[in-house]
Image (spheres, rainbow, N blue to C red):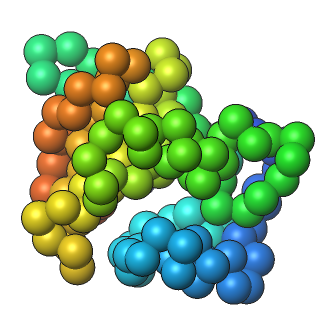
Amino acid sequence: MKLQWESYVWDAPHPVAIGEFEALEQQWGVSLLDEYRSVVSVHQGMTPNPHIIDIGRGESSICTFLTISEDESSRVYSMRDAHNLLKPHTPPGIYPFALTGSGEYVCFDYRDAPSQPSIVFVTIQMEIYPLVNSFSAFLEKLHD
């Protein structure tokens, strides 16, 4: 199913500026996936449609893909700020890229495969649940 994108953080698409991916990668010491870069470079701060992801026996809705761009008015949706929130409570190698409607995070998990991170779900209680083995599989799992 082809994803559609709806505005969430900003009223219109807000493309990632040149150098912002590299700055984040340098800060975190990871390489972000090309497929992720391609999607987020155009759709950061937007909601995918469909937006439901199965989490174990339940499901959650993806509220927005977190922003790479630093914007004081939308800090709550920043990947950096989300990572700073999670960092004291999760193992090294967990990096958030999406926020759910219930305030939980979908994250890259670089712990076992630095060149091909899996995707995990981090609850409000900071419990980590595996979702899928790749970003493309995550996108494919989104449904109505």
Marker count (numbered): 0
Where, by quadrant of the figure, is residue 34 drawn?
A: bottom left
Q: Position of residue 125 (x, y in %)?
A: 33, 17
Q: Is residue 128 visible?
A: yes
Above or below, 115 against 125 in this view is below
Above or below, 38 against 65 in this view is below
Quadrant including the C terminus:
top left
Instruction: Left or right? Give the position of 31 relative to 68.
Output: left
Q: Which residue is more in the foreground, 128 or 143?
A: 128
Query: Residue placed farthest to the front in the image?
Result: 88
Q: Position of residue 3 (x, y in %)?
A: 46, 50
Question: At 48% across and 43% down in the image, what residue appears?
Answer: 98
Q: Position of residue 88 (x, y in %)?
A: 41, 39
Where, by quadrant of the figure, is residue 33 drawn?
A: bottom left
Q: Which residue is more in the foreground, 34 or 4?
A: 34
Instruction: Left or right? Give the position of 101 relative to 87.
Output: right
Above or below, 132 against 37 in this view is above
Q: Position of residue 89 (x, y in %)?
A: 36, 34
Question: At 64% across and 61% down in the image, what residue appears?
Answer: 68
Q: Which residue is more in the foreground, 86 or 6?
A: 86
Q: Is residue 7 visible?
A: no
Q: Which residue is more in the foreground, 80 or 16?
A: 80
Question: At 58% across and 83% down in the image, what residue appears?
Answer: 22
Where, by quadrant of the figure, is residue 93 drawn?
A: bottom left
